[in-house]
Image (spheres, helix red, strand yellow):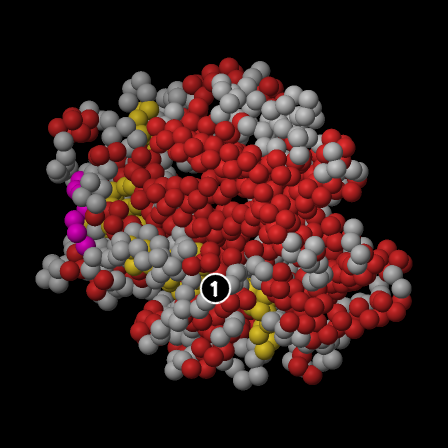
Amino acid sequence: QIDYLRIWRQYEEGQLHALLEMERRRNETCPHCHASPAGWRCLSCFGTPEGCTDCMRNTHKQLPFHNVESWEGSHWRRVTTDSLGVHLHMGHDGAMCQSLATSADDESWVEQDLGDISDADRVALECGLGQSFSHLPPPDSDTDEGKQKAPKESRITVVDVTSIYEFTVVWCECQPDYPFHRQLLDMRLYPASYNVPQTVFTFDVLEDFTLSNLENKVPANAYFSRLVHATNSAFPALVPVRSLFLISRFQRCARQWMHLMSRKSHGHGYGQPDQENAAGSMAEFCAACPQPGVNLAENWETMNAPEWLHARQLMVDGNFKQQNYRMRRPENDICLGDGLAYTVNEDDYQKYLSVSKEKKQRSTCNDHRAVLLTNKRRSHVQVTGIAAVACARHACFVPNATADLQFGERQINIDYVIVNAIWMMLVLRLVLFYDIACQYMVNFLTRVRDHPLLSLPAGLKIIPSIGLFHVHGHRESCVARYSPTFIKGLGWVSGEGIETVWPGLNDLAHSTRYMAPGGRRQFLNLHMGWHNDKKKHGIDLRKLENVCEDALIAGWQQLLNKAYAAPGNAKVKDEVFNVKVGKLPSRAEKGHEITQKHGAKREDRDMVRWANLGMDIEEAQIRVQMLVRRYQQHRRRADLLTIQKEQRKLSLKIQEFEDDAIKYMGGLDVDDPHSAKDAHPTPLGDVQADDDDVMHADLDDTAEPENVTIGLPSAFGYKRCMALGLSRVVDVEMQLRKGQAHDALQHIRDHIGKKSVLARKALREVRGSQRQEGAVWDRFHVLSTKINLQRLYYNRARAAMYSLAKDPAEISQYQKMTRVDLQAQTEQLIPDARGMRHRSLSWIWTIDIDEALAGKDRSQLINAIAQSQWLMAKCIVDRAQEEIILLRHEMEWVPASFKHAAAKWELLAETPHGKQVGHRSYAMKQRAANSRLHVMAVAAFKALLNKRPPPDGFNVGVSETGDVTW
């Protein structure tokens, strides 16, 4: 495009002059009648024709909303066709009613009443700077039952996609029982009132606003503001909207129009009250999911198909952007189509909530705690968000399975939408994805069984799962039990599709926040339907086996089959999918091990206590140095007071340490230049060399306690200590340093997990609220500081270990920790995290395995790791094969869904109401559209299969001719 822009620069001046020349009058006389002056031109007609008054009026009698201009002697001025004398004739396809004695076209412009406008606007209007209107639109006249019948002609405000107009309307009089509002509707003009309409909206403007709102999320007031400025950009105050009657009428009529269009497109109006009043009758579900009676064969239940093939995969999630403020007068709320689309029936829902009580459940997982962060009452809102159910494979919303949340993701709210979704789907095997499935499913069946208003189909089997984006925030046992990778029949699904849907709905949040509850639910339904409609129209194993013994593989396959057959929360999954690697021993455990190893002698206990004191002092020094660094940046008095307090504590501890040092270090003294020959120049060693968060060696006063070198063996080095026979104390510090490094690693893992949960849950849900978002960011930064502090502890411990090691290769698994290793990416939480299918993790997550491999149980662990890797690879292959099978069947289900929809419309065309000409025409139009979709889907899938046929080696359940075999 840059090249085209450069080329355009050559034509820029020419195009500018051409545009300027378009402002001339091309003809002195009318090119049609050749008699009168050409005083008019139309910018909307192709070619911008010019003509006289009579010719232009005759050509625009049925084109009243064209953009016309009049010649003012030296320039063109924008006017409307009403200035030509064009009137709107009702009842006869735009022609004048034959019952009228005279033609209204011969009448002149009525006297203008400027109404209540400012003096500046009045002068502008009188000077011809704006379009004139004879009146401001009064309130809807439906409330005035005593109003007289309108005359044969009346002035009416017309809102079109191009502008806001005022026209004279000539009513049809040949049919006495032909009401005005119906006359307008038959001319594709939607009336704002019904007794004596004063304002109408063209179908074009309502359809254009509907598309703008659904696709671009343009709110009604912003769209109407565009119309006002399109009418008169220089003086928008002259447009008759200052009373706010017109914009409020537009909002109301747009809402009515959208509801009518939704009913029309879903087959309402054909005399089928039972079907029309059924839950979900104004909603469509996913065409690619298996639906008995819609896209499955009649004998699908008796086919020898895998049990998982026809299972439904659903996911449920909460969205806390969709808030709604309390309505001042809730008795004025009206909901159109309540419970007929994607949101549940409000009366039934409130009745359910009134008899339901939330029972607190002890949380055991990080993600569950994150959900609890949202369980806070907000006094200014009555709805804190929504909970919705969608299909997990294609992210299409399930009809009648979206409900408002009053606090957070309470179980009583989620129970209701899930039960509704199950009954809408009528399935007996369900895979349910939920962020906290491990907690939620514990008592789900009990809650449903004990509730008077809830029930489930007999024989229903629910398999809980957690999406790949969230499962890593749980315990290791949750990964083995609920990860989609380890559940048979899921194919290659992440279970996180609903997360990608929320941003589209969140664009509505500001508008719907202030709506009446009924109107808000209606708009959410419309946008969910738009999302579903767009979805409808828009889906290394051998290497491991070569190095493993056949007997081992056979045993692993039996374990895998056992895990597949086990329920979702069975412990057998932990035994199969989790490698049992012991936890890295902490510093406390290392100290206990040392004392027990030598018979718990008092001397050993004292030595351990002394070495621990030295390490505690070094950690305190790091903390103080960070405080000093912060003080130098911000100069806060509170920080200075804290530094002085900590320095006094450090001085006392250092004195205590040095008093006992003579007992363990002999004659070595850090203050003696000969003894401390190999000592580190600062207590942080090489940690400081590349770190900006702590003080460097160029501090103003190196005598401060945070800069004093602590005389542990690592301060003198392995060779110096061994020369003086200090092997015992060297070994003690080495073991404790390993424990210190392990403690820091575990803290880092925990903090990264919490930080990721904050980023994924809390931060996402408070976005938009500056105060709440600031509070979450404060917690985020606190965790970042804690992570960095533990990194410094670890690197100090590592530096000491290398100083004490006889052979550095013995501790090579302890790598130097950099900031890159600490990125709190969501896939770097545990080794079973999202992304492990395709990439490896930072060493901080696998050091426990490296440590274990160096121990005495090396061979046993190697087999365990090989088993884990083989099972992971086999699960990936199984999921990939299942994905191919599911995709191949979906290639049959999608066309079958369109074929079923076409048959449905054909049946509607045969109903008594469907025999009406217009009803039948629309039904056949919809039947043809769905038939074309069916043909297109068949052709597209056939071309795809010819290009990429399913792989050989396993049965996909569909023959080459497209016949479903199972």
Q: Position of residue 319 (x, y in %)?
A: 44, 56
Viewer-nearest residue: 744 or 287:
744
Give the quadrant of residue 252.
bottom left
The number of callouts visible is: 1
Q: Quadrant of the image for the C terminus?
A: bottom right
- Point out residue 781 in the picture as x, y percentages from the top left corner: 47, 40
Amino acid, disc 1: Ser
Q: Relative to 533, is 830 on the left or the right? A: right
Residue holding disc 1:
363
Magenta-drawn segment = 134-140
Magenta: main secondary structure: loop
Q: Could you tell whether 31 is left or right of 142 in the image?
A: right
From what the image shows, is residue 657 above or below residue 333? Answer: above
Seen in the picture, residue 10 relative to 43 is either above or below; the reply is above
Picture residue at 44% right of the left edge, 68% below the top = 361
Q: How crowded is mark 1: few (under 14 residues within 10 Å), some or many (20 or more)?
A: some
x and y percentages locating residue 929 in the rendered image:
56, 61
Q: Which residue is drawn at 68% across and 25% down?
A: 675
